[in-house]
């Protein structure tokens, strides 16, 4: 039986936010390379692995480049 875990809290100064907008998520292993930007050209049905999104989010939390922005992330 699966148990639900509480979400992990990340402390940051009040008012800091980043909204990550991934393309279609896959369960593939991380590639370690991806495209990220405020806007990305999209063709076809772009995808991104959950592991790569997690890696980007980790970097975003520990930096300030993406604070108060909504980056799109894709392979």
Image (cartoon, rainbow, N blue to C red):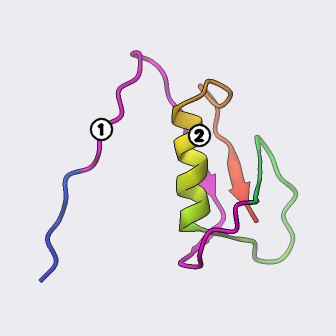
Quarter holding residue 28: bottom right
Q: Nearer the viewer, residue 69 or 62?
A: 62
Give the quarter of the image for residue 14: top left
Image coordinates for residue 3, horizontal then vertical, percent: 14, 71
The circle on residue 26 is: none
Residue 29 forms part of the magenta stretch: yes
How many neighbours does mark 1 have within 10 angstroms: few (below 14), some (14-19), or many (20 or more)? few
Residue at numbered disc 1: 9
Which one is in front, 63 or 73?
Answer: 63
Residue in the picture at 55% in, 64% down: 51
Disc 2 is placed on an element classified as: helix
Q: Decide if residue 66 is on the left or right side of residue 54.
A: right
Q: Nearer the viewer, residue 10 or 17?
A: 10
Q: Position of residue 9 (x, y in %)?
A: 30, 38
Q: Quadrant of the N terminus?
A: bottom left
Residue 47 location in percent, x, y? Answer: 69, 72
Left or right position of 49 against 13: right
The main secondary structure of the magenta stretch is loop
* Magenta segment includes 22: yes
Magenta segment boundaries in residue numbering: 7-32
Please give the label number shown on residue 59: 2
Picture quadrant of residue 19: top right
């Amino acid at each position: 039986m699966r148990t639900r875990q509480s979400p992990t809290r990340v402390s940051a100064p009040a008012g800091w936010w980043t909204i990550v907008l991934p393309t279609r998520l896959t369960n593939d292993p991380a590639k370690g390379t991806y495209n990220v930007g405020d806007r990305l050209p999209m063709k076809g049905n772009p995808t991104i692995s959950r592991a790569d999104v997690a890696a980007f989010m980790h970097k975003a939390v520990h930096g300030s480049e993406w604070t108060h922005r909504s980056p799109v992330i894709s392979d």
